Amino acid sequence: MTSRSWVADTFGASLDGDVRLPELVSLGLRHNPRRAHLLVSTVLGKHVPADPRVIHRVGCELGAAVAQSLGGERAVVLGLAETATALGHCVAEQLAAPYLHSTRRHVATATAHAAFEEEHSHATAHRLLPADPRLLDDPDAVLVLVDDELSTGRTALNTIAALHARTPRRQYVLAALVDLRDEAARSVVAKTAAELGADIDVVSLARGTFTAPPGFGAHTAAAAAALPAPPSSAARSGQVLRHDAAWAAGVRESGRHGWVPADVAAARAAAEQVAARVRDALHGSSVLVLGTEELMYAPLLIGLALCEPSREVQMSSTTRSPVVVHDIDGYPVRSAVRFPAHDHPADGPAERFAYNIGDYSDIVLVVDEDADTARLRDGLVESLREHCSLVHVVVLPCERPLPPPLRGPDFGSYPPADVAWLLTDLSGVALEAPTEEREEAIQSGGAHYAQSLPVEYQPDAEYRALYDDALAASARRIAHAVGLVTELVLAERGPRPVLASLARAGTPVGVLMRRWAAFAHGHDLPHYTLSIVRGRGIDRTALRYLARNHNPADVVFVDGWTGKGAIVRELDAAITAVNAALGTRFVADLAVLADPGSCVRTFGTRADFLVPSACLNSTVSGLVSRTVLNEQVLKPGQFHGAKCYRELAGSDVSRAFVDTIAACFGAVAEHVARDLPAAHRADRTPTWTGWAQVEQLSERFGIGDVTLVKPGVGETTRVLLRRVPWAVLIRPDAVAELRHVLLLAQRRGVPVHEVADLTYSCVGLIHPRYTRGATGADGTAAR
């Protein structure tokens, strides 16, 4: 049967085939010198909106045809981006088979399983990014490749060649809605199969041929350039309504990183949940569900859930494909919405398109969180407002492959078993800034402290001697506190909790708690370090990693000490939000070595004494910097970042510090056992006396900002090492234990004042140079 169209009538091209061909495709043109013609599917929901029930039915029909070809063999399905992603989903759904689709996105946390080229495409590069590489590594499973159409079969053969080199298998199936290969192309497939020693079967719903006269590409390009501009849409100005968190957390939104049969039911339930939210807010009865590029299956399921007898629902998708638009009968692409790319593509055009967008009461735009950008809101969303009364923006969470933890010796100087770093290695990125410059940016609101790093302080011989003396004097006291806090954790959360220390002060403590559990009980506790940033929350990717590999209820967060308790409050708020978003059951309790601020209920001591690791920076914390949260150097899905200062290895005392403390375990074990019953019986309810004193000091010295008051010996040391200090307050009876604080203050020209009524042994005040009206620490006006 011959399909007549404007393209055929104008340029002498023809599309001939069996009776179903006109039902499935029509002939269009594209702005592409590699291939001028375009087969425009009427049943995919890409260039032409279609009833989602038709899209799903045809996809499952192709899946049934593939099942008949397989004859009961196991299969794994691979869909080709971007047009066939939902089609591949439907085939996999019909086969109850695992599924993956190719992608043109760069995903920072994913490792490419394979890559191949689509020579004729506007965006040629395809990547396969399965979260579990074993998805494609089963040689006994037939690989089913799904595309919307087969013109030459080159893309499919490129895919087979890339995958067969890695995992040879005996059978492949090429599945497409239409097969337009000529005899030469069919012979290439047969030749490739013989070379591989495998069967390559082809399944389609319709067959045909495309014929074009000589010079077809040049003629169509010239004609396209002379076509009138597409008609402008009516000057409507619809409202915009966001439906946040409508898609259930933890449910995969696509097969970009893999999909298993059980995901279908979860996705259908999530789509019903979205549809219920949208249904309650619909403005009218004509609805377009608009997917975005590769994200087509989830919008299809949402469209299916919205279908009702009283409502007309269609589904379509945006695309990278530059198609010739001509508003004339007999041509399939009559109008176009053009808008700037709104994600971060690795290739492809900077301009994107949505075709044949008519007028609707409601448009439901479905995007994933990586595409939910300001460019989306200013570009596509604004354009869609001209086509409807209400634009519903539904943002789906991205299910990304989780990055692996870092371990020594590749990152950090601890042995690999001591700690797994849930961090991104930024060692090659210049992040350090001068102290004065950082302080000005932080206090003026121009930058967050976690966007950059302070220059690492390197102690001289005199300061290092103070550290050595402090370690020798306090090793047993620290070992006793480690023993107590570990035993409390084991009793309350054991017997085998998962330690998650807060980088970086918590890392040595987590290492020591792990070693105590091994010393006292023979337990081999998992220990991770992750990042939490004041004002930004905890690293959600790290928590997703922990939730995937452990029971969240077993995770115990660990830190070195408390100051006024800001991180305690940050952790509580962050974990509450994460549990709500991810459906997890993390416990926000924080276990610390020392709790002078009375902010937590699980601690080794509440005395404000010197933990020698507070005296140094990276050289006592595995050579790792403090953590960085900077969107300019970190991509979505990556852990928070940190640097490993390998060049400081000659000054590193990280292992020596924990080894020295651990060597005291035997000497303090009896003391820990004697004190443990009293620790269990004691009222450990936080009183927050430290926070109250910080507020008093802020008011007393006219600072007006509690974030500039850093209580406790650990925090005071950090002020002197990293910030612009204004003054140091010391309790008179603690002077003998604070020699390193006095030395640092002397070297930086910071005044030291004895204050008798301090709860803490000392308090560091950051210079409030950007806070108007502050009085000096001695009562005079601040300069």
Image (tube, rainbow, N blue to C red):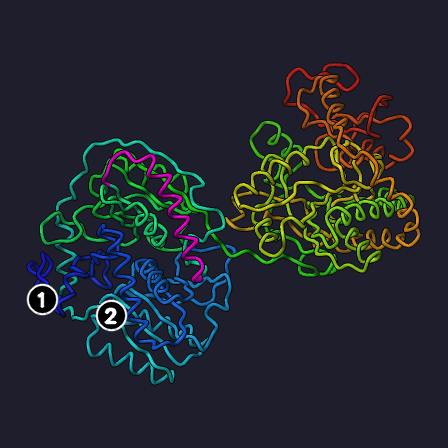
Assign the N terminus to one quadrant of the image.
bottom left
Alpha carbon distance from label 2 to label 1: 18 Å
Residue at point 24%, 64% (across, down): 34
The amino acid beneath tag 1 is Thr
Depth check: give the residue in front, 538 or 373. 538
Q: Is 266 one of the magenta-colored residues?
A: yes
Report x, y in % for residue 581: 52, 42
Residue at point 16%, 59% (across, down): 26
The amino acid beneath tag 2 is Ser
Q: Which residue is mark 2?
A: 204
Assign the C terminus to one quadrant of the image.
top right
Q: Secondary structure at mark 1?
A: strand
Callout count: 2
Residue at point 26%, 31% (across, down): 237
Depth check: give the residue in front, 272 or 396. 272
Residue stretch in magenta: 260-286
Q: Please give left or right for residue 95 compared with residue 33 in the image.
A: right
Q: Does residue 133 appear in this view?
A: yes
Main structural element of the magenta stretch: helix, strand or loop? Answer: helix
Q: Please give left or right for residue 529 compared with residue 543 in the image.
A: right
Identify whether 96 is placed above or below 457.
below
Report x, y in % for residue 213: 10, 68
The part of the image, by quadrant, that contains residue 379 is: top left
Sequence-wise first label, 2 or 1: 1
Identify whether 562 is placed above or below 55.
above
Identify whether 100 is placed above or below 484.
below
Q: Which residue is mark 1?
A: 2
